[in-house]
Amino acid sequence: MERLRARDASVVSVLYDMYSPALYGVVLQIVKIEETAEDVLQEAFVKIWNSFESYDASKGRLFTWMLNICRNQAIDAIRSRQHRVNTKTEDIEGPQVSGFSAAEFKPEYIGVRDIVDNLNPEQKQVIDLMYFEGLSQSEIAEAYDIPLGTVKTRARSAVKVLARFFKGRA
């Protein structure tokens, strides 16, 4: 700790050797892709080094502080555009909205985002994250600390509301 406070750069490799396996495991559980987990861990250690002065031993252990930094970096990574491009969204289980094939496309469907704004806040959050941000239901549950079943229920109820709206406009 004293060497970290004194900004002794050689202590970073000791810190890395001691904690990286456990931290990497946590990051990998969140991001699911080894290459991304390695990048996130590296970025997290840079952040740990650059922000060590903000660590307060009276508030918790060093490992816990580092774990929170790694977890936050991993969540930021899965929210990033590049990660969304590299992963696929899970299908919604339950009722599906019909009428969205290319042959049946209607120009009025372009305003879907405006329609989604009319959902209740919990439904809107899930639909925004799934369809406009590209996160899977599992990723939403992890990132927002919501039970997976709750995420699925919100998604299903939102799809039902949207299906009724689109049937009324067809």
Image: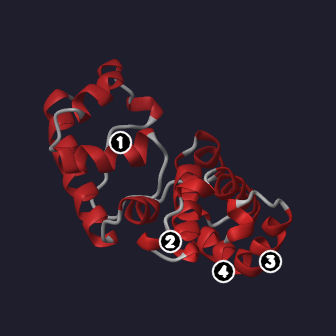
| Residue 66 on image: x %, y % | 58, 67
- Which quadrant would residue 156 be assigned to in this image? bottom left
**Can I make out residue 97 in this image?**
no
Marks 1 and 3, Cα distance to the nearest angstrom? 40 Å
Residue, disc 1: 128
Q: Outermost residue, right direction?
A: 10
Query: Which quadrant, please, contains the C terminus?
Result: top left
SS at badge 3: helix
Classify residue 166 as left or right of residue 24: left
Q: Mark 3 or mark 2, which has the lower sequence index?
A: 3
SS at badge 4: helix
Residue, disc 4: 22
Query: Which quadrant, please, contains the N terminus?
Result: bottom right
Please name whichever residue, 111 or 31, is drawn nearer the observer in this view of the structure: 31
Which circle, 1 or 4, is nearer the viewer? 4
> How many other residues sit within 10 Å of disc 2, few (<14), some (14-19) or many (≥20)?
few
Marks 4 and 3, Cα distance to the nearest angstrom? 10 Å
Please name whichever residue, 90 or 57, is drawn nearer the observer in this view of the structure: 57
Marks 3 and 2, Cα distance to the nearest angstrom? 21 Å
Residue, disc 3: 17
